[in-house]
Image: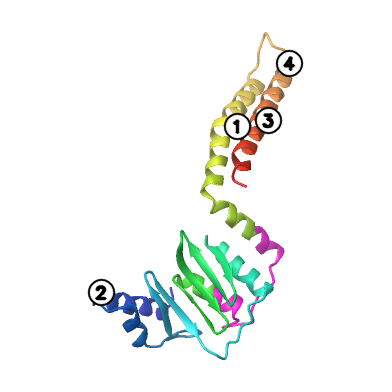
Amino acid sequence: MSEAFQKAVEWVLQQSRDGKSLAEIQASFPVFKDSNITINRVVSNSPPLLGYFEEKLKLKINDRVIRAAILVAKLRGFDVFVSPPEIRIVRDGVLHGLLREDGFAASDPLLFRDIAVRVYGIGGPPDHEVSVRDSWLDSLARLLSDRGFVETVFFAALVILLPPTLAALSLLITPSRFVPDPVRLVISITILLAALYLARLYFRENLGQRQ
């Protein structure tokens, strides 16, 4: 966490503990700076949503900016809602990020940094293009952030696929005086194919309902 962000969070929390309202905190909010990071506004105090707003930014909210914001948010497990002229980054209904033409705010220092660099070009040129590598990371992040998907895959691997796979391997590597090798091979392949078929049905039934 950057020193400026940490100090800003501590300042907002202390003001809240002192019983000050959000309006009072916003009115007396100081500027926190740390190398390329400048924090000059607090949008909310639960959780502390800290931001940098400046008219000279003049970011145009277009499709490329929206895609970049979605990538940044999804890689950190957040959802995105676009309502021009702003983009909202949320998790479980709680606002954690806000992007506007004149600035942005975030509750997480890493999210703040990514928005600053990738979307607004603070500390370097903006990166609004999604590379092939990042698109794969984006897809992976979306899947891993879906608890239902992870639970479905885990159950299928542990209950449907693992026992038949172990049984088939055991049948293959254990010599038998009564069952010829070709027969054991066919039985093992049949067991594996049956397990894969059951797993396919399970995925189609459970993941299909989520679409």
| 60 or 169, nearer to the observer | 60
Query: In terms of sequence position, does the residue under pointer 2 or pointer 3 come before the other?
Result: 2
Mark whose residue sits in front, 1 or 3: 3
Return the x and y of residue 33 as percentages of the image width and height: 43, 86
Inspect the image, locate mark 4, and give the three-letter code of the amino acid beneath it: Val
In the displayed structure image, the side of residue 94 where residue 178 appears, left or right:
right
Q: Which residue is mark 2?
A: 17
Inspect the image, locate mark 1, and give the three-letter code of the amino acid beneath it: Leu
Residue under the image location 55 percent in, 52 percent down: 144
* Magenta-tinted stretch: 115-136
Q: Which residue is mark 3?
A: 197
Residue under the image location 64 percent in, 56 percent down: 139
Mark 1 burial class by Cα count in 10 Å: few <14, some 14-19, many 20+? some
Cα separation between marks 4 and 3: 21 Å
Q: Which mark is residue 161?
A: 1
Q: Which mark is residue 104?
A: none
Q: Which residue is mark 4?
A: 183
Cα separation between marks 1 and 2: 53 Å
Farthest residue to the left: give it.
Answer: 18
Query: In terms of sequence position, does the residue under pointer 4 or pointer 1 come before the other?
Result: 1
Query: In terms of sequence position, does the residue under pointer 1 or pointer 3 come before the other?
Result: 1
Inspect the image, locate mark 3, and give the three-letter code of the amino acid beneath it: Tyr
Residue under the image location 64 percent in, 74 percent down: 65
Mark whose residue sits in front, 4 or 3: 3
Farthest residue to the bottom: give it.
Answer: 56
Mark whose residue sits in front, 1 or 2: 2
Q: Taking 5 as reference, is 195 above or below it? A: above
